[in-house]
Image (tube, rainbow, N blue to C red):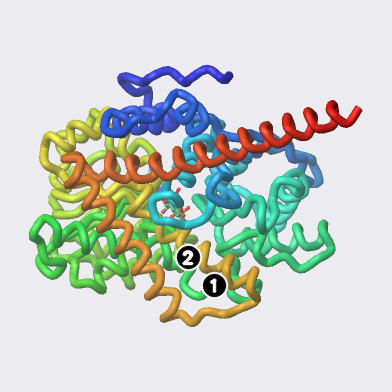
Amino acid sequence: MATMPPLTSMMDNNPYSSLLSHIDSATSYIRLTEDERNVITSPVKELKVHLPVIMDSGQIEVFEGYRVIHSTNLGPSKGGIRFSMGLHLDEVRALASWMSLKCAVTGIPFGGAKGGIKVDPMTMSNGELERLTRAYVSALEDTFGPYKDIPAPDIGTNSQVMAWIVDEYERLKGDPSPGVVTGKPIEAGGSAERDQATGRGVMVSTVAALKSIGLQPEQSTAIVQGFGNVGSVSALLLQKQGISVVGISDISGGYYNPDGIDVEDAIAYAQNNNGSLVGYSNAKYVDADSFLTLQADVLIPAALENQITINNADQIKAKLIVEGANGPTTADADPILTQKGVLVVPDILANAGGVTVSYFEWLQNVNNYHWSESHVNRSAEKTIQDAFETVYQTAVEFKTNLRNAAYILSLQKLSQAVKKEKAKSFKKRRRRRLYQKRMRLKQ
Ligand code: NAD
């Protein structure tokens, strides 16, 4: 039997340690057997690949890639692909596990996975990125599959990268297989609204959470960290709900305007500026460290892990944090926020809009069907709204915070699945023993 990962105490900002700590925290409310905990904390597969790519200079560079499949008990594994220089196995492992928990909490019949390549996509030409992506697919050809393991976009990847993935996979297999990846462009079999999906889920969670603490969107202000897919769409949709977005930020720093930022204007600026807010002059520049502690009712971290830590948690002024990013709050910052009375909508609920619409895209692909934009949006909003209410009720029932509640619900589902697998394998062993006994009697 595999040994249990140790119970965690103070964190080292390793996202996998954070995940284990959140599991420990939730299991002080529900019982998991040692077997169940072992299975749930042990990803089923961890792959590391080396990808030689011919660069534009004619030289070969070798890149490191990963794919971790955390679980397949509830369905094929599902999870994004990240292109980032800082990528490491523990990060991918944590992200894969969060995908399993996210699917379980929203009731989506997928398991969890995550992958990525150690690369800074901003330093690569389009041709180099395409060759790198195709090399990754070729190395993982037998892992991916519409009923096995289905990637999607994450940091540093987009619908164009997904289009290369499906194209390379179909070329290798020789068959059309649009369900092998989600987040594709519409013309390559993508779903309406996938680009907006994660931000839409963040918006739905924010509005529901604001109401739960007696605040109306029209009287609330928000700051959003990260201005990529999740951050920019969240900011735009929050503004459409009447929330005044007073701060936005990206890797270039923060931009603050207490009278509200015109998010459409900022998106147009970034689009014409190679995706960056650098030099944005319709707001005051603030450095990255002060940004998270600016005055606002809502804080949406939508960039990276480990942004809210023991070093800044007690200076946060927001009453509500909605985690657009995965793992933006370290485990040891969580109790500080709870003590301050800050309501935190955890990542596995707040950013589950992305995997929800990925599931709708996959359903359309494998059934050769098309959903309208309004059908996708309505269904996605209902999924997140229902999940929010279930998590909220669980928090009330267990007298705990939303993160513990979301973990309680998803761990209960995953442990049920482990129990079922165990029962199935007992039955199989019993049938085999009976068959062997009958054969012996015949001889
Ligand atoms: P993205 O690459 O589109 O955007 C990332 C943004 O973060 C960029 O604006 C970048 O400049 C900014 N950023 C990077 N470092 C920063 C820093 N130190 N401070 C401030 N900003 C910084 O990525 P994305 O797809 O928007 O993903 C963002 C987060 O949301 C990640 O944690 C990802 O795992 C999570 N997420 C994404 C999806 C999805 O559908 N794309 C779904 C669920 C969760």
Residue 264 drawn at (x, y percent)? 33, 72
> SS class of the residue under badge 2?
helix
Q: Are marks 2 and 1 in contact (CB under 8 Å)?
A: yes
Q: Earlier in the sequence, mark 2 or mark 1?
A: 1
Residue 55 in the image: x percent, y percent?
75, 47
Estimate the x, y position of residue 347 in percent, counting from the top left: 35, 47
Q: How many marks?
A: 2
Relative to the observer, which residue lies in front, 407 or 338? Answer: 407
- How crowded pointer 1 is (Cα within 10 Å; few <14, some 14-19, many 20+) is rated as many
Q: Amino acid at mark 2?
A: Val
Residue 274 relative to residue 58: left or right: left
Mark 1 lies within 8 Å of ligand 1 (Cβ measured):
no
Residue at 31%, 33% in the rendered image: 30
* Residue 375 in sight in this render: yes
Q: Which residue is mark 2?
A: 357
Query: Where is residue 189 drawn, in percent x and y?
Result: 63, 72
Quadrant where the image shows the C terminus: top right
Local SS, label 1:
loop
Packing grade of label 2 (10 A; few <14, some 14-19, many >=20) is many
Mark seen at residue 191:
1
Q: Of 176 and 273, which appears nearest the observer?
A: 176
Q: Which quadrant of the structure image shows residue 353?
A: bottom left
Q: CA distance from mark 2 to mark 1?
A: 8 Å
Instruction: Please name the amino acid that badge 1 sits on.
Output: Ser
Q: Residue furthest right?
A: 443
- In the image, is 247 to the left or to the right of 90? left
Judged left or right of residue 157, residue 49 is right
Vertical placement of 294 versus 277: above or below? above
Q: Indicate left or right for 114 with 230 as reference.
A: right
**Which quadrant: the N terminus?**
top right
Q: Nearer the viewer, residue 10 or 25?
A: 25
